[in-house]
Image: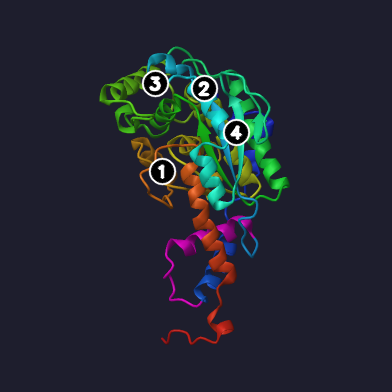
């Protein structure tokens, strides 16, 4: 299946994405250069501020309504012994999110971000709860070492979940969102996607995930190699890469990245798995990258490969490998700092400060 065979509603989302505005970026940079500081002295903070203006096509830039969306789904490939934890941990951790006991809960509170949990493919049942969105496509993917993880119809349904949430975010006035995930086995899926999209050897993009020993990592890479042979994936066939090797949460994050870009909402991507979703979004909709920030650099080896594929430089590097959107949430503080600098610093003229002489 090629991009031309995507359903019409998904194609419309992709075709509706406008690139980041170079005119607005130049206007923003001109303002930043007049602030009371040596030009360039705030480093990448200046770049972040200019990018936000170019994304939003308005001033003052805003981080209003910031929220992290954690998409949860299970993976049939866990049958191959690729994870240090059993599949039941996915539903247990989602319940932990809902009870406020996870790292992402603490970090979201730290930066004042809303937290939305989305069940898009958890194998177990979850009771209704505040902050939980029930959008289950299926109770976990199939084992992609034996058959495609998802049908095309399921893949597109999961992508629509993310797109709908992007539309809701726009209606709620959100200007910045983060995407994170929870799903035992999803580092195997992300490694397989990374290998398929970049032609990297599975050994290069496969890491310890939830804590596998060396032999377990080797087994995981072998499972991925077997799956790539089984599905004979062509690098240009992005929809097949996602359907055969992905997960419902990965497809939903890709859909949200596309939907958010369509609505000029900045997307902060988290670690390896959400970056795999961002890479899928980029491969389908190249302009979606214009609305992405890489929150941090994960310890997973495949993350570096995917960030290079995307051409994104992480805002933070804290040796994290948790997922959940944890690194992306921390990066909200960088975006907010950039916005405050842009909006609240005086210019040389307004402060009566002499500018640098030529």
Q: Along the polypeptide, which appears first: circle 3 or circle 1?
A: 3
**Residue 147, numbered label:** none
Q: Along the polypeptide, which appears first: circle 2 or circle 3?
A: 2
Q: Along the polypeptide, which appears first: circle 4 or circle 2?
A: 2
Report the number of numbered marks.
4
The nearer-to-camera label among 4 and 2 is: 4
Q: Along the polypeptide, which appears first: circle 1 or circle 2?
A: 2
**Residue 74, numbered label:** 2
Left or right side of 194 for 123: right
Specify the quadrant of the image occupied by residue 198: top left
Name the residue located 62 percent from the left edge and 59 percent from the top edge.
62
Compare residues 214 and 202 and report the one nearer the observer: 214
Specify the quadrant of the image occupied by residue 252: top right
Q: Can residue 296 be seen?
A: yes
Give the labeled residue for mark 1. Answer: 307
Compare residues 102 and 325 and report the one nearer the observer: 102
Give the labeled residue for mark 4. Answer: 98
**Residue 228, numbered label:** 3
Q: Can residue 21 be seen?
A: no
Q: Does the CB distance between marks 4 and 2 fall below 8 Å?
A: no
**Which region is colored magenta?**
36-57
Q: Tag 3: Cα neighbours inside 10 Å, few (<14), some, or many (≥20)?
A: many
């Amino acid at each position: 299946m090629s991009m031309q065979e995507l359903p019409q509603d998904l194609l419309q989302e992709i075709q509706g994405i406008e690139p980041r505005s170079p005119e607005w970026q130049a206007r923003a940079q001109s303002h930043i250069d007049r602030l009371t500081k040596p030009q360039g002295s705030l480093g990448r903070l200046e770049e972040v501020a200019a990018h936000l203006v170019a994304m939003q096509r308005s001033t003052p830039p805003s981080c209003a309504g910031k929220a992290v969306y954690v998409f949860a789904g299970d993976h049939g490939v866990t049958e191959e012994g690729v994870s240090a934890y059993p599949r039941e941990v996915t539903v247990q951790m989602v319940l932990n999110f809902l009870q406020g006991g996870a790292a992402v809960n603490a970090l979201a509170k730290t930066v004042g971000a809303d937290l939305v949990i989305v069940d898009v493919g958890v194998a177990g049942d979850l009771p209704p709860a505040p902050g939980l969105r029930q959008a289950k496509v299926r109770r976990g993917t199939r084992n992609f070492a034996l058959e495609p993880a998802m049908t095309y119809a399921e893949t597109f349904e999961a992508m629509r979940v993310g797109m709908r949430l992007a539309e809701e975010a726009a209606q709620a006035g959100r200007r910045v969102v983060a995407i994170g995930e929870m799903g035992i086995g999803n580092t195997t899926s992300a490694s397989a996607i990374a290998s398929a999209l970049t032609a990297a050897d599975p050994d290069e993009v496969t890491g310890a995930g939830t804590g596998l020993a060396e032999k377990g990592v080797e087994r995981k890479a072998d499972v991925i190699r077997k799956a790539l042979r089984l599905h004979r994936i062509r690098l240009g066939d992005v929809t097949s890469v996602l359907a055969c090797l992905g997960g419902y949460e990965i497809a939903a994050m890709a859909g949200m990245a596309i939907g958010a870009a369509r609505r000029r909402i900045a997307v902060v991507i988290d670690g390896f798995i959400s970056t795999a979703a961002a890479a899928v979004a980029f491969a389908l909709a190249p302009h979606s990258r214009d609305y992405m920030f890489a929150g941090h650099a994960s310890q997973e080896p495949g993350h570096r490969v995917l960030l290079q594929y995307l051409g994104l430089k992480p805002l933070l590097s804290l040796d994290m490998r948790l997922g959940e959107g944890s690194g992306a949430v921390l990066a909200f503080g960088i975006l907010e700092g950039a916005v405050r600098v842009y909006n609240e610093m005086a210019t040389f003229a307004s402060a009566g400060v002499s500018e640098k002489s030529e």
